[in-house]
Amino acid sequence: MPRLCVVCKEERASVKRPKTGEQLCRNCFYHVFEIEVHCTITDNKLFKSGDRVAIAASGGKVLAHIMKTLNDRYNYGLDLFLLSVDEGITGYRDDSLETVKRNQQQYNLPLKIVSYGELYGWTMDEIVKEVGLKNNCTFCGVFRRQALDRGAVMLNTDHIVTGHNADDIAETVLMNILRGDIARLERCTEICTTGDGRIRRSKPFKYAYEKEIVMYAYFKKLDYFSTECVYSPNSYRGHARTFLKDLEAIRPSAIIGEAFQIKQEVKLPTQGVCSRCGYMSSNELCKACVLLEGLNRGLPRLGIGKTNRLRKIHGEMPENTATMLHFSQLQIDGENGKSESDEGKKRR
Amino acid sequence: MSLKVSLSFNGGMELLFNNVKQKTVEIPASINNSNPTTMKDLIRWIRDNLLKERPELFVSGETVRPGILVLINDADWELEGELKYEIKDADDIVFISTLHGG
């Protein structure tokens, strides 16, 4: 006796929702999933008509599909772009980028790919050769974040949406608690962050379970690429994820949280701007610049271990060391010749 | 008596199976004495007969590792009795890992 969908009471149920335990057929599942993301977007006023929005599309095929669908159906009036990062990981991202290129044709959205090789002069393959498999995910995470912001500037967009879901956020919360990183603990649960006011970042899937996103992609036969990153098995996040999946198996609501608020009297680091590259930073130099300096000086631990101690031993950065392009000097695609520094100032 | 079952491995799980994403296998109709073969039996059978490496990334105790989604004939296995589900001939079973990325 097949179980029937609790909503339409006609079709065979295909999904048990982790959030509610409801049993839904495919069509009713699509409907509630899309409506919930739509409500997340409208309740939190994530966009306004005319916004130029970059969809961080490295792994988020479902996000691209949903953004396109909702934008068309509910007339958000957004200009959508696909933004992908090429970390330079042989056998991992090159397959995924092929998928993104197919998505571009399916959804008919402009695609921008920014690569670590171009931005930083180092691919992840080269970085792993230099630093090994212990802290490589730190480099990748720090570099990806900034790469997306740089890509968004080049696309002349003011908003990035990422595919972070409830599971991802729960992992990040756990990692920030274990690291004692109060400032990030508060920020990581926010649905929209503005950084230093340059580019907004939001998470339309904040309340969506990974299980539902994967099921949605599977049933809709979305061109979905997902494979374990060849360099990530040792990552801190991997352990947090395994732990949370174990918790979820016992009590699915362990994944969903709201937000943390830190008491006002707690002193948090103030956000400023990196003196070297102009990216937002709560220190004089942003993490990406310190990591990059370490790579370029053959001191890969400079940004991982005790930076000040290493500086005492090896001195300050020699003047001829390569650095990344200053944020204010990024060129907007297709507007060659026009002065971009004005654009950079305006954004800041 | 044997059962023909179609197995699929997605979301990176194929890496544990020599990069094979889809495979039709024949398994005994009763692996465990005279009882009908269940998902629990099938998971153990896969581990013992198909898995090429790192069994801890596929099984945890007698079930699949948390974070691996299972579909039985395109329905969430949580609706089908999970480990107790009795395998039928021509069943279509899909495993999807959600454990990737760093």
Image (spheres, coloured by chain):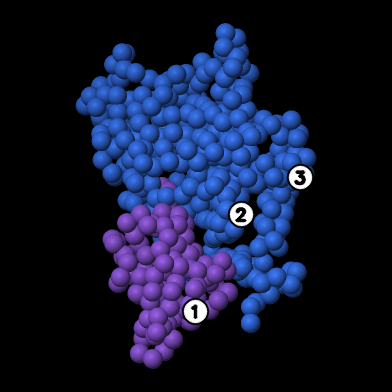
Identify the chain drawn in blue: A
Q: Which amino acid type corresponds to the residue marked 2 in the rendered image?
A: Lys
- Examine the rendering and report whether any part of residue A307 can be seen: yes
Q: Secondary structure at mark 1?
A: loop
- Examine the rendering and report whether any part of residue A200 can be seen: no
Cα–Cα gap, marks 1 and 2? 26 Å
Relative to A134, say whether A79 is above or below: above
Cα–Cα gap, marks 3 and 2? 17 Å
Q: Position of residue A320 (x, y in %)?
A: 31, 13
Q: Which amino acid type corresponds to the residue marked 3 in the rendered image?
A: Arg
In the rendered image, which residue does mark 1 sit on? B88
The residue at 77%/44% (across/down) is A74
- Cβ–Cβ below 8 Å for labels 3 and 2? no
A296 left or right, relative to A276: left
Which residue is more in the foreground, A152 or A199?
A: A152
Disc nearest the viewer among 1 and 2: 1
B89 left or right, relative to A160: left
Q: Which mark is residue A73?
A: 3
Cα–Cα gap, marks 1 and 3? 41 Å
